[in-house]
Each structure stands twice: as C-alpha cells, then as structure tokens.
Amino acid sequence: MSRSEGVRSRKVLIVTVAALALTMGAVASYVTSRKAAPQIEGLLWPQSKALKAFALEDHRREPFTLERMTGRWTLLFFGYTHCPDVCPVTMSVLKNAIALMAEAGSANEVPQVVFVSVDPARDTAEHMAGYVGHFSPAFLGVTGDDANLKEFARQLGVLYIRAEPDTGGSYLVDHTAAVFLIDPRGHLVALFQAPQEAQRIARDVSRIRDLEWN
C-alpha cells in the first residue's frame, strides 16, 4: 500500500469511527428526550452533553478553559494550519456562516468560532494568530500540550492521527472534520459533518438557538 493510500484509509477510518460513535449518542439522546427537536441537517443532542473542565491556551497566550465557552454559543473545529484542503475550506465556510448570522441578528447572537489545533508542535501562538486572523480577527486559535489536547478531543469524540513525515520532514495529520456547536452552558448540542455549507450552518444554528434547552 502506498503512503497516499494509507493516508486515505486512515481518513476513512477516522470519519467512520467518529461518525458512528457520535450518531449512536445522538440517537440515544433523541429516544430518551421528550422535546421535539428542530429539523436540521446535522446531528443533534436533545439532551446535551456537558463538557468537563479542560486547560488549553489561545493564540494570544491566554488560558482557554470551559469558562471561555459559557455565556455564549460556540462553533468549534479541530484542524491544523498546515492542512492543505479541509481546514481552509471549513474555516471559510465558518467565516461566511458567521457573516450570514450577523446579517440576520444582533452581534450578541453570533457564535464565537474556535479553531483547535491538533498539531501543537508546529502551530505556535504566532502561527495560529496569523492563520485564524486571515479568516476573521474575531476567530480564536487554541491548542495545548498532548495530554490536555487529547483529553479535550476525547470529550467530543474527535480523533486525529499524525502521518509519517516525508523525506523533507513535512507531515499530514488526519483528523475529524466535523464542526461542533456548544451552547452557552458549555454543553455539546450538535455537530455538522463535512462537507459543510455556510447557509445550512447559519440556518441550523438559528433553529437550535431558538429551541429552549432544559
């Protein structure tokens, strides 16, 4: 098997395993919930999952903890700045989705966007600042040491695998490509699987936000 075939195989495995685990959780929540869920094209948890405390750092070198995701909605995406395709496309989609939501409502209703790097070895604070700033000065880039990053990713069912470096030392990181929606209580409520569309994310976030969560 060639290196490119191996990378593709790992990507399929990551997407399949993550989607299966997340879908099972969503179905279980739906069955036990008495609330009527809004019609969206993502996966929805009517009984949302409370995130546990974590310790990461943003691109301004300030602590990024669970408290930074309480009091407002958050769109969360895991990737890395050297990603050649999925990450820049998804970040552009999120930029456009935020613009659509800003046009439709007040600035206070627009979710914050958090880019979580799964490549802390290369994604320094300065590098992430330039990367997220290219899409929006309001976007946050965060990462952490291996232990804290893996624990945070595990809470959301995110998988990532670093591929073997090539002869020049460059490498890819296979990772879950979903966008996660966190409510103002710090609870995971939904995810949007790739490929995402700005109009759908803006519409579905609005529908979910209008739902009264217990």
Image: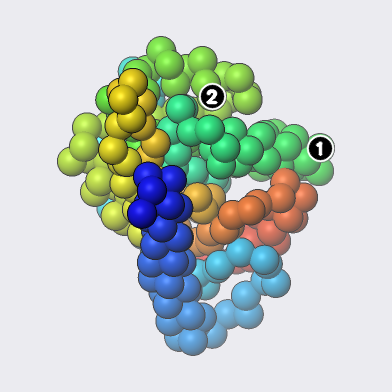
The residue depicted at 52 percent of the width and 21 percent of the height is 131
> What's the amino acid at mark 2?
Val
The residue depicted at 50 percent of the width and 50 percent of the height is 177
Residue 193 quadrant: bottom right
Classed neighbour count for the residue bearing mark 2: other residues with Cα under 10 Å, few (<14), some (14–19), many (≥20): many
Residue 172 in percent (x, y) is at 39, 36
Disc 1 designates what residue? 103
Disc 2 designates what residue? 132
Label 2: element kind: helix
The residue depicted at 48 percent of the width and 33 percent of the height is 83
The answer to whether residue 185 of the structure is visible from this angle is no
Residue 155 quadrant: bottom left
Q: Nearer the viewer, residue 34 or 119?
A: 119
The reply to whether dot 1 and dot 2 touch (C-beta < 8 Å) is no
**Residue extending furthest toward the front:** 1
Q: State which tag comes first along the sequence, 1 or 2.
A: 1
Residue 208 in percent (x, y) is at 64, 61
Instruction: Point out the image quarter for the N terminus.
Output: bottom left
Looking at the rendered structure, the number of numbered marks drawn on it comes to 2
Q: Nearer the viewer, residue 67 or 121?
A: 121
